[in-house]
Amino acid sequence: MAGGARDPGRSVTSRALAILGAFDARHARLTLTEIAERTGLALSTVHRLAGELEEWRALRRGADGRFQIGRRLWELGQLAPDPLQEVAHPWLQELFGGTGENVHLAVRDGLEVLYVDKVYGKRAVPILSRTGSRLPMHPTGVGKALLAYEPGWFVTSYLSRPLERPTPHTITEPGRLARELAQVRAQGYATTHEEMTLGSCSAAAPVLAGGPPADGQAYRPVAAVGIVVSSRRVRELPRLVEPLLTVAARIAADYRAAVARA
């Protein structure tokens, strides 16, 4: 099939972006055929554009012929003007140092949470999240902490969708989930118990730094900080809430100051 025959009318830019968009946390390494299948582009088009992207270092090809995202995109990503990760990372390290548990930072991106930073140790419970990965909002602590502070119309729209159920403990009933989100907003933090992964539970707090506040409302969340422990130690989770809230508040304060200076 001639290059582009399966995708008439699409610009070269849109095709190149489609190739880059074929990669995600679950598909970090792809063959040319897999890229073609995931993008709907002709294999000859993928072959040509992947070669150009590799030359530009946006893609990198391994010894087995599979492609993965190249370092050039990482370099460009470091130029993003948002200071969130820079101001948050030292506080994440402090929270990890004080607890020894996995700590991560996530933002909302569409209907998912995107993990933008993580601090962890070898002895901490294994978790699914990693920097650059995405997970649904409702089964994750950070997702609930963010969803609870979204406008009512957004929450209603989110809950009206068929909700994924990663484990038997995932809350998918709209009424029950809405009540839990109201509780999250009232207490200032969220918890989960084996809702995303069997064997782990979590607590998360929003980083309230978006704003400024209006009509008596609090700052909007720009991110959420989460901490994950083994389900065998779920009774220890309450003692982690206070340091978690402290770190979330300090990240928020430093973020607002950084934005004000920019």
Image (spheres, rainbow, N blue to C red):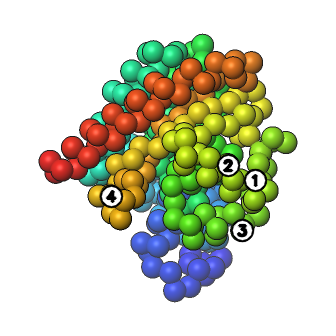
Q: Check disc 3 and report its element: helix, strand or loop.
A: loop
Circles 2 and 1 in contact, beta carbons < 8 Å: yes
The quarter of the image holding the N terminus is: bottom right
Residue type marked 1: Arg
- Say which of 98 and 41 sits in front: 98
Label 3, on which residue? 160
Label 1, on which residue? 176
Q: Check disc 2 and report its element: helix, strand or loop.
A: helix
Of label 4 and label 1, which has the lower sequence position? 1
Q: Give the percent coordinates (x, y) of residue 55.
A: 38, 53
Label 2, on which residue? 180
Residue type marked 3: Ser
Label 4, on which residue? 213
Q: Give the percent coordinates (x, y) of residue 148.
A: 56, 53
Instruction: Residue lying at the far left in this picture: please name it.
Output: 261
- Callout 1 crowding tier (Cα within 10 Å): few <14, some 14–19, many ≥20: few
Distance from the alpha carbon under mark 3 to that under mark 4 = 28 Å
Circles 2 and 3 in contact, beta carbons < 8 Å: no
Task: Say above or below: 250 vs 236.
Answer: below
Say which of marks 3 and 4 sits in front.
Answer: 4
- Say which of 262 and 209 sits in front: 209
Q: Give the percent coordinates (x, y) of residue 167.
A: 80, 42
